[in-house]
Image (cartoon, helix red, strand yellow):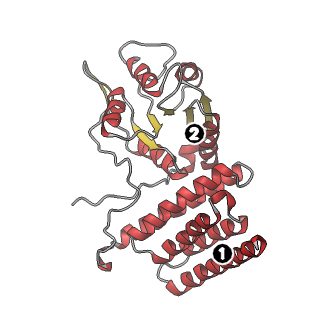
Amino acid sequence: MTKRQLPSAEVAGEALASLKVLVVDDHANTVRLMSDVLRAAGVGQVFSAPEGLSAREQLARRAPDIVFTDWRMPLMDGLELTRLIRMAAVRPDPRIPNPEVPVIMVTGHRSAREVEEAREAGVNEFVIKPFTPAALLSRIQLVLSQPRPFIVSNAYIGPDRRRRTELSYSGPLRRTNDPEEVVDIVERRAARETISVELEAMRRLIATRGGVDRATLQMTYRVMQHTRFRARQVRDRMLERASDALLRYAEEVGGMEHCDAEVVSEHFNVLSRILEADEHDAAGAARLVRGLESLIRRKRAARAAVAA
């Protein structure tokens, strides 16, 4: 079986700084969140449009290097926008300076039929909602580091579709009952690097937005779900235990928006310290996790006392 690699969000800073990215979505909160993630990561210029018709005008004015677009939008949806962009390869349109511009579809649609429909329209990559910072950045990395040949034919106009994309993939494929020795050390390190990138992206996002809010808390929950999954798949028990501690605490208090800010901050701190330390220092990692769990117990007790 071919070994599958973890999605990476490592993009050189200078590559991001020179990018112009267009975000197309009819939900203002989603546009703001995506734009904040991209700016926090170091993307040089981020523009937005509420639907396809407005996006077409932005294409002419801004000549973006990458387009992130929602699927369902009024006036002109993401599929229509993508088809319009690709058609300019055979019918030149002054409003579309680059018919080959990478288009990344951001959508909750993931059935095989819908994916194929988007592929036929000329979409390069997908980001499935709800997304995390690394999901957006890893797709940028894909279109920059692994560009697809552009095809113009009677039947199809767009990027070569022969490379398979794992839409729901979040980490190396391992069965939880596999023996310890099957976990490749390279995969474990790749998982830790991916988690580290995700945490740093979250920190930058929170700083860009001026602090923790509902949207960043919800995204933090998704990031921790992915962290727990990745850690479990590569048998990194302390990372799994630390992320699980926050997830369980969030469920106890009724959601991430009810979590104590100190717990969220300390959780990020503990994960970062584990990732920065020697991965073989199990005792040190265990001490950090016990400290986090102790803090959660104190917060839980204080919450119970107030309720009483």
Q: Tell me the kind of residue under disc 1.
A: Ile
Amino acid identity at mark 2: Ser
| 10 Å crowding of disc 1: few (<14), some (14-19), many (20+) | many
Residue extending furthest toward the bottom: 283
Q: CA distance from mark 1 to mark 2?
A: 43 Å
- Quadrant location of residue 171? bottom left
**Percent of width and height locating residue 241:** 51, 75
Kindly identify the residue that appears in the image at 31 percent across and 68 percent down.
Answer: 175
Q: Position of residue 218 (x, y in %)?
A: 60, 53
Circle on res. 18:
2
**Where in the figure is residue 138, as x and y percent of width and height?**
46, 49
Q: Indicate the position of residue 280 as horizontal and vertical percent values.
A: 47, 82
Q: Is residue 171 left or right of residue 215?
A: left
Observer-nearest of 209 and 117: 117
Relative placement, left or right, of 40 versus 55 is right
- Residue receiving disc 1: 296
As helix, strand or loop, the secondary structure at mark 2 comes to: loop
Q: Give the residue drawn at x 56%, y 44%.
A: 16
Residue 170 visible in this rendered orientation of the protein: yes
Dividing the picture into quadrants, the one containing residue 203 is: bottom right
